[in-house]
Structures are given as structure tokens and as C-alpha cells.
Image (cartoon, rainbow, N blue to C red):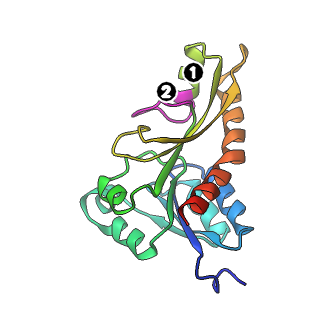
């Protein structure tokens, strides 16, 4: 049975602000699935690599601005038309609007490149997180996948995975370890959430 014939097809949309490596990894993972697909990638940055990667995989790519996201219901209405089973934030840097969270309760998740509740919150993203982890002489770091609420990195944690922080680690080498955890676990956790919700 093809995806189009399968009435139980799970739809994922991804929000990304950056290069889109996690978004692309998720797209590729679900291209092998019979009942789940990434149907759109949304970005708030015209230069985001995530948009190009979506195009490369024949996934709809949508660019929006602050007005469409916060002031009007433009983005919300597009999401409602798609009616996704899961909204995945993969390197998305804006605070998610409560009106979208309320419309899709327990269907918006995010990945954070540290072990929450440590090293989360406004301004804590990318290399800033890894620099803070190293500066605090932490023995381990990792990833946190969590539900999204009205505050940065504050929702209920769904899954965490860890990696050691070595004495000679830099922000770059630690980032590389974290990326490996993201690529390995994020698609699988998404799949588990969708299976649980069905």
C-alpha cells in the first residue's frame, strides 16, 4: 500500500532556523516509512539551509516572518490546514506561540543540545550551550527531547541521552558528539511518540 492510499498516514511538520541537518535527517528517516512522512519545513530565516534541504527532498518549504507567526494567524492557519500529527522543532530559535501550542496540545516537541533543566532558556542555543557546559566543567552533556510550552526549554522531558565531556573537549568537538546523539535518537523518538498517539 502506498503512502497516499494509507488513510492512517502520519504527517510531520518541522520548524528550523538553521542549516537543517536535523530536519534533513528526519526527512530521510521517514522516507523509508510506509505510514509517516514529513510534509513541510517552516523557517523564519530566508538564508536557512533547512529550506534548501527541504526542496532537495521534494518537501514543501515555507518562509514566514514575525508578523505571520505572532501578530496574525497566517502560520497557524497553514498548520491547521495541514493538520499534522506532530510539530517538530529542530534548531528553531523563536519562542513558539501559545495559540499554536493550544491548538495542538502534546503535539509540539523540541530538541535541545544539553541535559535540561541545565543550560536551557533564552539565548541558550548552538555553540553557546556547549561553551557553557565546558566552562562549568560538566562531566557529561547530551540531548533533551521535550514537549514545548510557553517558555524556552521548559516543557516536560520525553527523552534524554548522554555523552561524556572530556577534559580536552572544545565547543566544536562537543557539538560533534551532540550531533551524533541527535541524528541517532531524534527520528526514533518521533516515531515512538507517533506510535503511542495512534
In the image, which residues are magenta? Answer: 115-129
> Residue at 57% of width from left, 36% of height from top?
113
The answer to whether 171 is drawn above or below residue 49 in the figure is above
Q: Is residue 93 magenta?
A: no
Q: Is residue 123 magenta?
A: yes
Q: Is residue 71 left or right of residue 46?
A: left
Query: Mark 1 touching mark 2, by CB under 8 A?
Result: yes
Q: Where in the figure is residue 11, as x and y percent of width and height? A: 55, 70
Alpha carbon separation for disc pair 1 and 2: 7 Å
Magenta part, dominant SS: loop
Number of residues whose C-alpha sits closer than 10 Å to that of mark 2, classed few (under 14), some (14–19) or many (20 or more) = many
| Mark sitting on residue 101 | none
> Residue at 37% of width from left, 50% of height from top?
96
Q: Residue furthest left?
A: 71
Q: Which residue is mark 1?
A: 133
Q: Which residue is mark 2?
A: 119
Amino acid at each position: 500500500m502506498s503512502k497516499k492510499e494509507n488513510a492512517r498516514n502520519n504527517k510531520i511538520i518541522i520548524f528550523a532556523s538553521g542549516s537543517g541537518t536535523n530536519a534533513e535527517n528526519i526527512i530521510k528517516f521517514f522516507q523509508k516509512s510506509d505510514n509517516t512522512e514529513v510534509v513541510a519545513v517552516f523557517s523564519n530565516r530566508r538564508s536557512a539551509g533547512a529550506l534548501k534541504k527541504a526542496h532537495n527532498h521534494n518537501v514543501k518549504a515555507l518562509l514566514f516572518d514575525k508578523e505571520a507567526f505572532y501578530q496574525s494567524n497566517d502560520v497557524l492557519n497553514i498548520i491547521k490546514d495541514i493538520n499534522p500529527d506532530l510539530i517538530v522543532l529542530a534548531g528553531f530559535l523563536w519562542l513558539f506561540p501559545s495559540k499554536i501550542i493550544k491548538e495542538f496540545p502534546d503535539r509540539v516537541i523540541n530538541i535541545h543540545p544539553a541535559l535540561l533543566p541545565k543550560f536551557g532558556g533564552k539565548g541558550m542555543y548552538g555553540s553557546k550551550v556547549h561553551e557553557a557546559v565546558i566552562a562549568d566543567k560538566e562531566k557529561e552533556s547530551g540531548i533533551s527531547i521535550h514537549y514545548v510550552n510557553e517558555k524556552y526549554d521548559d516543557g516536560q522531558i520525553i527523552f534524554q541521552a548522554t555523552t561524556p565531556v572530556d577534559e580536552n573537549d572544545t565547543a566544536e568537538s562537543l557539538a560533534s558528539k551532540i550531533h551524533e546523539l541527535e541524528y541517532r535518537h531524534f527520528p526514533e523518538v518521533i516515531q515512538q511518540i507517533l506510535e503511542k498517539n495512534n
